Amino acid sequence: MDLQNPDLILVKRLSEHSCSYFAVESIAGSDVVLTDIESGGRFNFAKPKLEQLVSNGQLRTIARRELPTKLTFKPLSTVKKPKAETAEDVASKKEMQRRYRYVQGAIEQSVPAYTEKWLTPYIAQKAAEINDSGPPSWRTLAYWNKAFVESGWDKHALMPKHKAKGNRTKQLPQEVHDLIDEVINEYLRTHTVMRYQKVYDQFLEQLDTLNAERREADLVELKPCSYRWIVNRLQNMENKVKS
């Protein structure tokens, strides 16, 4: 299976009379992004996992010319040909993997606490193991671990901050969702009258603090949600209480 072939289409049978069709949008190392030709939805797979799905018959391959007529004439301009990795992409993925090895190792060794006492000897041991001449400080590793766990164990949360542009999504990161929940819960605990702007201001203040920590750990800064997003969230909560 040649994932670089722009005519390659992957097919997933949903029922006897229904299938979904996917085109390869991009390839970055072992990560492959597929686009649902009909809905435009995007799905991420590790290349070995994708090959396994094809091998066991959960996905099958066809040529673009074999698409059903209703899809053959559907604009496919949103489907991009795979792009070759740049030197910056390779360097960033290498750095992400280096950080992941530290984080993964600490988790596997069940480090008792992410403090200087426990992390300093672990970092020295791990740096020697992977031949790393520039190991992180214990504070930096503690924050890498925090970012990794709060992202749902997604190692892309460890991508260096200068690659932020290539890792943005339309959805809010889990860290931002969690911060919004914390701010709203704290506000409701200490106030009886809801002031939308006040909640949003407190959210922005807390986000600034969080981003200062992320900059120190060389992680991408988190973007705030809009004021309207906060208002909608609070109004939904109020409506649930009333009902």
Image: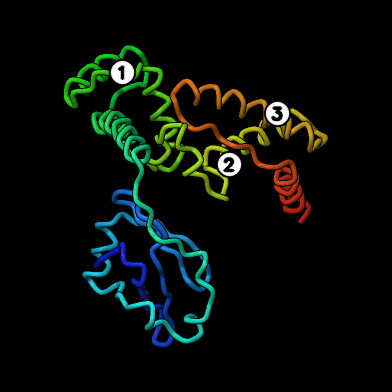
**Type of the residue with mark 2:** His
Asked if marks 2 and 3 touch (Cβ < 8 Å), the reply is no
Q: Residue at x 74, y 34 (%)?
A: 199
Q: CA distance from mark 2 to mark 3?
A: 14 Å
Toward the viewer: 125 or 133?
133
SS label for mark 3:
helix
Q: Residue at x 30, y 16 (%)?
A: 118
Which residue position is annotated with label 1?
A: 119
Q: CA distance from mark 2 to mark 1?
A: 28 Å
Determine which quarter of the picture holds residue 103: top left
Crowding at mark 3 (Cα within 10 Å: few <14, some 14-19, many 20+): some
**Type of the residue with mark 1:** Leu
Which residue position is annotated with label 2?
A: 177
Q: Earlier in the sequence, mark 2 or mark 3?
A: 2
Q: Earlier in the sequence, mark 2 or mark 1?
A: 1
Q: Which label belongs to residue 35?
A: none
The image shows residue 108 at horizontal and vertical percentages of 25, 33
Q: Residue at x 31, y 62 (%)?
A: 4
Q: Is residue 157 left or right of residue 8?
A: right
Q: Which label belongs to residue 202?
A: 3
Q: Residue at x 30, y 35 (%)?
A: 94
Q: Earlier in the sequence, mark 1 or mark 3?
A: 1
Image quadrant for the C terminus? bottom right
Image quadrant for the N terminus? bottom left
Taking 77 as reference, is 17 above or below it?
below
